Each structure stands twice: as structure tokens, then as C-alpha cells.
Image: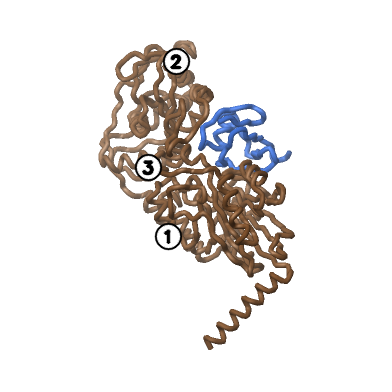
Chain colours: A blue, B brown
Amino acid sequence: MKVYVNQKSVDVLPGMTVKHALTSAGLFQNIEASAKICDEWGNELGLDGALSEGMRIYVKQYKD
Amino acid sequence: MKKWLAVFCLSLFLFLLASFAFGQEIEIRILHINDFHGFAEPDQPLGSDARLGGIPYLAARVNELRKEKPSLLLSAGDMIQGDNWANLFQGESVIEWMNAMRFDAMVVGNHEFDFGQEVLKKRISEARFPILGANVEGLAVLKPYVIEELKGVRIALIGVVTQDVPLSTHPRNVAGLRFADPVKTAERYVGELRKKADVVVVLSHIGFPADRVLAEKVKGIDVIIGGHSHTKVTKPVSVGKTLIVQAWEHGKALGVLDLVLKDGKVIGFEGHLEEIRPKEGREERASLAILKKYKERVDAVLSERIGETEVDLDGENVRTRETNLGNFISDIMRQASGADVTLINGGSIRNSIKKGEVRMKDVYSVLPFNNYIVAIRLTGRQLKEALEHGVSAVEEREGRFPQVSGLLFNYSPSSERGSRIREISVAGRPIDLDREYTVATNDFLAAGGDGYRAFGEAIESSGDFSAVGGMMKREKVVYSDSGRWLRDVVAEVIKERKRIAPRTEGRIAEIR
């Protein structure tokens, strides 16, 4: 399943979550406490949120 | 007296019905949560200094809001699996709380299947509210829909769950079940229920992007109450004439949707999310009692003696060499998944266990992360590259150092990074770089954690995934059990064997 993290495409398995997509994009371990993860409509997502094919997620700083 | 009471009630009912029929505006309220995952205590979300949620506080707010308007309390699924507070009782604690809270209905989520169908049937039998699943075929205890009545307003609730359930849980959990297309299923029931109800609500566990598609394709849905994607929809989203809402995750927020109806139609709405902020002294008593009761049981279960080890289990040296604990865990993963070999990161093992009694909490401290087992087909070349990566930072004691099962290898730590592996054998034979091997690992490495790229490359080339007859059908991925944490699999094996004595066997050798 292909999803996009800050425009970067990553492949994850069905059942994997936002956390896995961030890991796959190399962002999870360096993510700042002030960051929020949002979908393409600007809604905040939980790290355990399910992904779907073609989904676009973005890491945004809290102060944005 | 009884007769007069009956007459009074009947009159009141007819009055309310008449009011509705004669064009009065009626307001009703829908309260909703989703993806609770057993988080009974407050949780600290990413990007926040504050702790949010906690069932005593959530319940207190629900009760306050219920007093203001006729209300329904609904859940959009994934309630019974996740945190220890739920998992250690296979969701019984959650259903007990939902009963105490007088939930009106919930849709089954994909994680409701994680403990197997027999456990799910038991949970459904315990629930004093309907559990829905209109697109689940083969599980008769799930109702496709229910019609609730509030102040004379008939509200149809249809439940749909993601078709990906067979791809994200163990195949045995969904054996004999079929998950039909949620859009087609909703279309079928909406057509039928528009004739019987004033308001049509879909309780959906398919995720926010799919909810938008559902709203676009199926006309006649007034409200979609969503879950699965853990989306914080702060205000209702309108797609055509349908409102979509979702209340984030873990009970950190409560969704509140007020609908105004006239002549059997929704003519207005106001909706928002309320973050649940714990405040001492504001706990709802029944929920607090249930929280405490199961917390005590959690402590008791974690302190339970599950077996005995005849040797010290070494979790200290897992970042530099083969250890008996690394062997034990990776052997279990290979056995559970039916893989040829296992490769995990030593960093996933966080503690040692001393010779003697083994308690549940010892296993939980060794494997504190919510990792699960995945098995992926890698070529011998990819497996070798993965091992090269694993030993590439042994000097820095990086967590990527491998612990393995089903294979032996030696390496030269003084050689250049990327060229340290000398020999690898699988099942007693030299590795064939062009052959495929099934490799068990954890979901963290499968997603590219600790810099492992081989699994991601295999997933990328894996093609489409599909579920056929309740079994996973895919090219490279042969096992993925996202509903069962690795620590629980390991604890189960210790319970079964009672006594363990794993040893190092020369699986990983240094060449000096």
C-alpha cells in the first residue's frame, strides 16, 4: 500500500498505521514533541490511525 | 394507579408523535467516540503537554450532555483491543464499562476480531447494546442495523467495517467470514431504511477518506460517524447532504452532534469535539470503580508467575552479540509465523530476566513496545544486505544489531561497514542469494525502522493485496498479525512450556 508522507511516497502493509508510515519515511524517531500529524484536509491524526491507499499525511509543527 | 400511568404515558407518546408530525422543530443529540482501544486512563497525545481522556472524566461529561437533550451514545468501533487494560481481559473490561455507560450501539471494528470469533461472540453476548456489522457475512450475532427512537424521531443506525480486516489480523480470526463492499452494503440498507426512519446514520469503521467516498456515492445518509483513521474532525464535514464526524482516538475527545429536525428531515446541526481533560473530583463514580477494579486485576495478571527459566535470560548484550533471550524470542517468531528464518533488532529487547520464576511483567519489560509479528519473502541477497546493515554499527551498540533464528552467520567487525558479513547458512546450507526465504520480523523493521530497507523493498515489489476466502493473498507478505503483541505471544509460549532454558548456539560469530 502506497501512502505519502510530506509528499514522499512510502510502502506499508495493510494494518500498518500513521506511526509506521512515519517510520518508513525516516521521520518517526526524530519527530519533535511539538509536531502534529495531519491528513490532506488538515485534520489531526493519531499515531495509531489506519492508513489507506494513496493517503497523504503531513508532519506539521505545533506553532504552524 | 397503574392504569392512569399507562394512559398518561400513551398520551405523552402521542403528543410527542403529533408534535413531530405537525411541523415542530425537534432537537436530538448524538454523542460518539471511536478507536478507544482500551485506554481507560488519561493519555498524553503527541504535541501536547496535557493528559487527555480517561473513562471517569469522559463518562462525567457524557452524563452532563445527556441531561440537556435526548441523546444517543454511539461508538464507531475498535473498542476492545489495544491497551493492557483491555487486552489482558480480551475486552471484557471495555464491554462492562460500555454497559455501565448505557451505550446505544457500536459498529464492530477490525480490531474487535483480534481475539478470535469465539471471544467476539462472548463479548457481543455480554453487551447490553447492539453491535453492528452490515457488511460482515458469516457472523450472525452482528446486526446489520437497528432503529432507535428519540422524542418520536426514528433513527436508523447502519454499521460497516473496513474490508481490510482479513489483511490486518490473523487468518484464523476471520476464517469463514466475508467482508463485503461497505459502499454497496450501505447503499442497499439506506434505500430500505429511508422508508422506515427519519434520520439515517452510518456507523462506519472504514476511515475518514473512505467516509468521504461513501458520502459521495450513497445518497440518503444524513450522518456518517466514523472511526479507523483516528481522525480529529473538530467540526462536522459536509459532503453533499451528508455530515461526517469522527472523534480522534483513545477517548481523548467526545464527539457532540446536535441535529434539528422538522417534518422528518434534518434542517440544522451543530457539532464539535470536546477534549476530555481530567480534573480531580469530577470523576463519574461507576466508571471510576470499573477502572480501578480492572487496574487491580491488571496488576495481579502482570505479577502472575507464568513459568520458570533455568538460566539467566540475557537482554543486556543484544546489541553486540547473539544472546539466549534473542534466540528464544526469534525462535518463537519463526514458529508462530511458519517462516524460514527470523531477523529482529536487538534494540527491541529492553531487559534481562534472572534465573528462576518468570512473571508476566518480566516479559512485558523485556518487550515493552507494541510490536507484532510480520513475515515477508526476501531474496537471499536482500537477507544478506539486511544482515550487513544489522552489524554495520556494532561498535556504537546500535539497536539495529540482529538477533536471528533459522540461520547462522559470521562477520568481521573490523572490516569496512557494508562488507562485514562472511558466511551465511540457512537450515544448514549456504545461503542462495537468488532464492526467496520467508523472514519473520517485527512491524517496526518491516516499516523500515532502525534503517532496515530490505523489508520495505520487498513490500514495494509485492503488488496488490487481496483477501480471498478470509485468507491473505499476496506475493511477498505471508504473515501479519497486527492485533497480537509479540510480548503476549512470548508469554503464551512460556506458559505452555512452563520451564525454559534457551542457550546460545553459535548463530552469530565474530571473525577477529
**Residue type highlighted by circle 1:** Glu
Residue B179 x/y as whole percent: 49, 43
**Residue type highlighted by circle 3:** Asp
Task: Give the chain letter at badge 1.
Answer: B
Q: Which of marks 2 and 1 is nearer the N terminus?
A: 1
Residue B216 x/y as whole percent: 67, 44
Name which residue lies at 46% across and 39% down: B166
**Which residue of the protein is positioned furthest toward the bottom in this rendering?**
B1
Q: Is residue B218 above or below residue B511?
A: below
Q: Nearer the viewer, mark 1 or mark 3?
A: 1
The reply to whether residue B298 is in sight is: no
Residue closest to the eye, B13 or B90: B13
Q: How crowded is mark 3: few (under 14 residues within 10 Å), some or many (20 or more)?
A: many
- Total labels: the figure holds 3
Label for residue B381? Answer: 2
Q: Nearer the viewer, mark 2 or mark 3?
A: 2
Along the horizontal axis of the image, is B172 left or right of B218? Answer: left
